[in-house]
Each structure stands twice: as structure tokens, then as C-alpha cells.
Image (cartoon, rainbow, N blue to C red):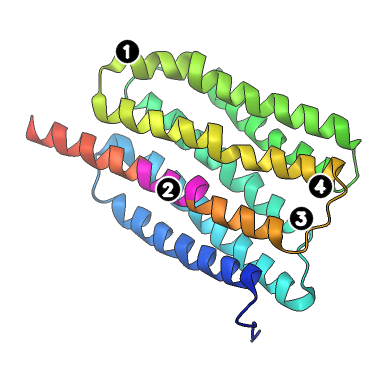
Amino acid sequence: MAVFETTDLTAASYSTAVLGLVATSALLLLGTGWVARNWKLPVALCALASLVGVGAMYEAREAWSAGHAVPVVYHYVGWAISMPLQVLALFFMAASVGKLGPGLFWRLVVVSTLMVFVRYLGEAQYMHATLAFLIGLVFWLYILGELFFGRMDEVIRGSLNEPVQRGYFWLRLIVTVGWAIYPLGNFITSFGGYVDDGALSVAYNIADFLNRMAFGVAVLAAAMIDSGEKAND
């Protein structure tokens, strides 16, 4: 068992993120039994994203304890699974109040997966860093375009469902503001010559409280409020 120094902020951030993600996963899994049937899949997808984060964070913490360095692959393995799951949670959230086509589903799956994979290729030097950064940025902007101006936004606005609209607003804000740390980190490491001495890992771990934990809790909150209102009708 690794023993960390009291002043090891990076190790502390990993441990806190692991425990926070475990608690979030448990809450969301329990929450699938508290919501209406149309909400079970979005909540379950967020629970899976949190569970993936638990495994990725634990492995990264072990890597940090072994050599006080965390190779980028530890970050990207988790993101490559959890971020598409979260995008799909948004898709099925919108699909619960309106009709969405299968084409949009597959575009979101492919784009959200490639967004992470291309950034990894750039940081791992399998692809030209500038090209990888720009492609990853375009994919992220495409997702934002769908969320703000696409069919999903149209369905949410047309539903007149206040809990869904409010939840969608906050979730879209997380994807816009919270997820901005990933291209920013990619830019710093690819073009700034930055070698992570633990500070960037701390930033990523803190961001997980918003990007994975708060995201899942926001979906659950919207689901419970909407389910409660329908049960009272």
C-alpha cells in the first residue's frame, strides 16, 4: 500500500476524486430507482461515467505513487469512455421529451469518442500536435453546436418542461465551461512544453467535481423533479 506525504497535494486530489466518484456512482445507481422509466437510462449512463472515473483515477493515483508522474494515457483512457457516455446521457434526456433521429445518436457517439482519441494522439506524438489540437477543438465545438443550436436544443425548448429545460441549461454549461479545461490542458502540454509535475493533474481532478460528479447529480435532480411532478399530475 502506498503511503503519501501529508504535503502531497496531487495524491490528495486523486484520493478525493476517487472517493467523490464512488459516492456519486452509488447515489446515481440508487437514483435509477427514484425516477420515472424514461429517466432511468440517462441517470444510469451518468453512473457508468462516474464508475469509469473511479477506475481511471485509482490507476492514475497508483502511477503517481510509483513515480510521481502520470502519463497522459491514464487521463485519456477514462475520458474516452466517460465523455461519450455523458454526451449520450444528454441525448437520451432530450429524447425523453421529443423525437431525435438515429443519425444524431451515431454522430454524437463518433464525434465525442474521436474528440478524446485525437487529442491523445497529439499528446502521445502519434499525430502532429497542432493538427490534433485543432481537430479535437472542432469536434468539441461540433458537440456544443448540437447542444446550443441543433435538434436537441430545439426539442428541449419545444417541450415546455421546466425541470428538463433547467437541467439542460446547467448540463450544457458544464460541457461548455467545465470541459474547456481539456483542450486548455492539451494546448499547454502540446505547445507550452509543459511537463506535468502534478499541478495539471490536480486541476483535472478538481474539474472532475464539476464535469463528472456535478454533471451526474444535475441529471438526477432534473429527473427526480420531473418524475415527481408527473406523479402528482
The residue to which callout 1 is attached is: 158
The answer to whether residue 44 is seen in the rendering is: no
Instruction: Give percent across and percent down for residue 38.
Output: 30, 34
Q: Secondary structure at mark 4?
A: helix
Instruction: Give percent across and percent down for residue 21.
Output: 48, 60
State the separation of the CA atoms marked 1 and 3: 41 Å
Tag 1 and tag 3, C-beta contact below 8 Å: no
State the separation of the CA atoms marked 4 and 2: 26 Å
The residue to which callout 2 is attached is: 214
The residue to which callout 3 is attached is: 73
Q: Is residue 216 above or below residue 23?
A: above
Report the span colored magenta: 210-218
Q: Secondary structure at mark 3?
A: helix
The residue to which callout 4 is attached is: 189
Precedes in sequence: disc 1 or disc 3: 3
Precedes in sequence: disc 2 or disc 3: 3
Q: Amino acid at mark 4?
A: Thr
Instruction: Give percent across and percent down for residue 116.
Output: 70, 40
Residue drawn at the location 72% of the way across and 71% of the way down: 64
In this rendering, would 82 be left or right of 196?
left
State the separation of the CA atoms marked 1 and 2: 25 Å
Residue drawn at the location 22% of the way across and 38% of the way down: 225
